[in-house]
Amino acid sequence: MRKDIIALSTGILWLICSNAAVSQTAKPAYVSLAFIRSKSPDFIVQEKEFWSPVHQQLIKQGKKSAWYMYRVKYPQGTSASYDYVRFNVFTDWKQTEAPYAGVDEIIQKVHAGRNTEISKKADQVREVVWEQLFQVIDEAVINIKAPSKYIVANMVKTAGGPESEYVKMEITYFKPFHAERVARGIMSNWSLYKPVIPYGDKYEFNYITLNGYPTWEDITKNNPPDVWSKVHGNLSFNEIHDKILSMRNTVNNEVWELVAFAVE
């Protein structure tokens, strides 16, 4: 059997098992992340004015549950390979198969009487550098009415033990910690994503943690001293933090800023 087929089969099997293991309290969800390089200032104008209502209609028809567009705030410059990140959020696996089915008819409906040739010129204003499907392993906040204004994205590679142990550490210790931070207004959400297609050892990272914040100042705001003890009592934060750091290597860290979105 070909190695790529084996890798895909292994990834799907892990996905099915992980649903049962770590997503018992939330409906499984998937997110397609597209890393985009803009070619023109018209790109984001088109996204907001032309594509946003199209995505809203796709959501209304049940093709997905949300669409977000983030600008990469850091890093920037000529060495950066992309400057925008698009989220397509799905509530079940079936939606991931053909999220843009019937989009031409939707465009005609949403933009009746307008010049819809813009939809055929998307490649002139942007280039999709990379698109990957992720499973949402867990979140600190399940029902989100609007996405975070800022996201600190940490791409990590597990090390020093099985992936399942790393996931257990995140969910057992850091999910409730971040949930308490959300309750106090320091954060707006925390998520743990795992790539499922494509997936394999040749890729730099095998998990992403997304720390969401309502304002720029909140990113560096100090936690109240009792946040950790509120959820974990006398358990040592430093000990747990050092342990999880020994189980993962951060291969990339970025900050994304919300510029457009559509939700249910």
Image (spheres, rainbow, N blue to C red):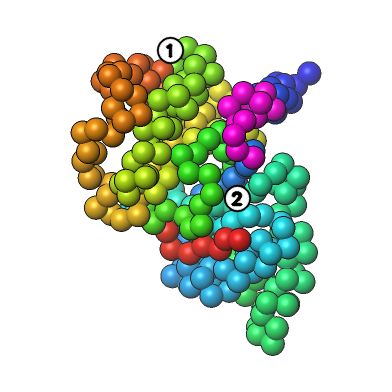
Q: Is residue 246 magenta?
A: no
Image point 71% across, 56% down: which residue?
63
User: Is residue 137 depicted above or below 216 in this figure?
Assistant: above
Q: Quadrant of residue 253?
A: top left
Q: Taking the image as drawn, is residue 187 in sight?
A: yes
In screen coordinates, is 122 left or right of 246?
right
Q: Tell me the kind of residue under disc 1.
A: Gly
Q: Taking the image as drawn, is residue 250 in sight?
A: no
User: Is residue 114 depicted above or below 80 in this figure?
Assistant: below
In the rendered image, residue 37, in percent from the top left (x then y), is placed at 48, 56
Label 1 SS: loop
Q: CA distance from mark 2 to mark 1?
A: 31 Å
In the rendered image, residue 165, in percent from the top left (x then y), is placed at 49, 16
Q: Quadrant of residue 160?
A: top left
Image point 31% across, 22% down: which residue?
233
Q: Residue beneath label 1, please?
A: 160
Q: Nearer the viewer, mark 2 or mark 1?
A: 2
Q: Earlier in the sequence, mark 2 or mark 1?
A: 2
Q: Tell me the kind of residue under disc 2.
A: Val
Question: Which residues lie in the magenta part?
Answer: 16-27
**Residue 89 disc label:** 2
Q: Nearer the viewer, residue 215 or 127?
A: 215
Image point 70% across, 24% down: which residue?
13
Label 2 SS: strand
